[in-house]
Image (cartoon, rainbow, N blue to C red):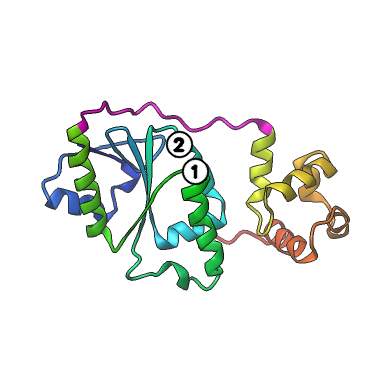
Amino acid sequence: MIIIDKMEKNSMVISELVAANQDIKIEKLKVADYIIGNIGIERKTTSDFINSMLNKRLLRQLGELKQFKQALLIIEGIDDHPLYEFGKVHPNAIRGMMLAVTLNFNIPIILTQNSEDTAKFLILLEKKQKQVKKEISLKANRKAYNLAEQQQFILESFPGIGPVTAKNLLKHFKTLSKVISAKPKELEKAKLQKKKVEAMKKIIETKYQEK
């Protein structure tokens, strides 16, 4: 059986699995998009992979995925949307992230052409898992982050602010509210580059307009 997170219900992958008469079960999963045996699988389209890389959601998801005995990352749609043709991201940044997934997290990456190809990989994997007859584990939980980590993650959501910069800003200003309310000159004195200050202030001060 392939267990599928209900957030995937609009994915064409499910349609392909049903068409192939694959035994599936849809549940609300705390971690992973698919579970086959003891393997947790995260599926991302090429555009979602890039976006989650930029907003750092991918790193959190990969960390949580490691709770499974084995894990896989599927990047889907490489035929229609090649990974290295996203103008907003340099190809080497994408290559670097893929290396980090493989080397730092020890999570293999599978590149698929489309939803049909993804479904075929999942079906084949499920067949192989039947042979080993391992128990299915649904006990993975989201990692509990402490307050300091949560504060850092908020700052890391701003363009160009990584873990080191976020930590330095919090050490300098002491609280998250003081970082956000700081004047541009104060942020620059804290060694935050001017263009990053401008990008941060634009996000903070621009009036919200729902689209």
Q: Is residue 15 magenta?
A: no
Residue type at mark 2: give it: Lys
Q: Which SS does the magenta portion mostly show?
A: loop
Q: Nearer the viewer, mark 2 or mark 1?
A: 1
Question: Is residue 52 among the parts visible in the rendering?
Answer: no
Which span is picked out in magenta?
132-147
User: Residue shown at 81%/41% (left/top)?
Assistant: 171
For residue 173, above or below residue 115: above
Question: Is residue 60 among the parts visible in the rendering?
Answer: yes
For residue 57, above or below residue 116: above
Q: Quadrant of the N terminus?
A: top left
User: Residue shown at 49%/60% (left/top)?
Assistant: 50
| Closer to the camera in the image, 140 or 6 | 140
**Which numbered disc, 2 or 1, marks the residue that appears first in the sequence?**
2
User: Residue shown at 49%/43% (left/top)?
Assistant: 105
Mark 2 — residue?
Answer: 66
**Residue 149: image location, x then y, percent:** 65, 37
Count neighbours of disc 1 (C-alpha within 10 A) and say few if under 14, some if 14 to 19, many if 20 or more. some
- Secondary structure of residue under mark 1: loop
Mark 1 — residue?
Answer: 105
User: Residue shown at 63%/51% (left/top)?
Assistant: 157
- Secondary structure of residue under mark 2: loop
**Residue 102: image location, x then y, percent:** 46, 49
For residue 47, above or below residue 40: below
**Residue 64: image location, x then y, percent:** 47, 37
| Closer to the camera in the image, 100 or 114 | 100
Residue type at mark 1: give it: Phe
Q: Are marks 2 and 1 in contact (CB under 8 Å)?
A: yes
Residue lying furthest front in this view?
103
**Residue 24: image location, x then y, percent:** 19, 40
CA separation in Å, label 2 and label 1? 8 Å
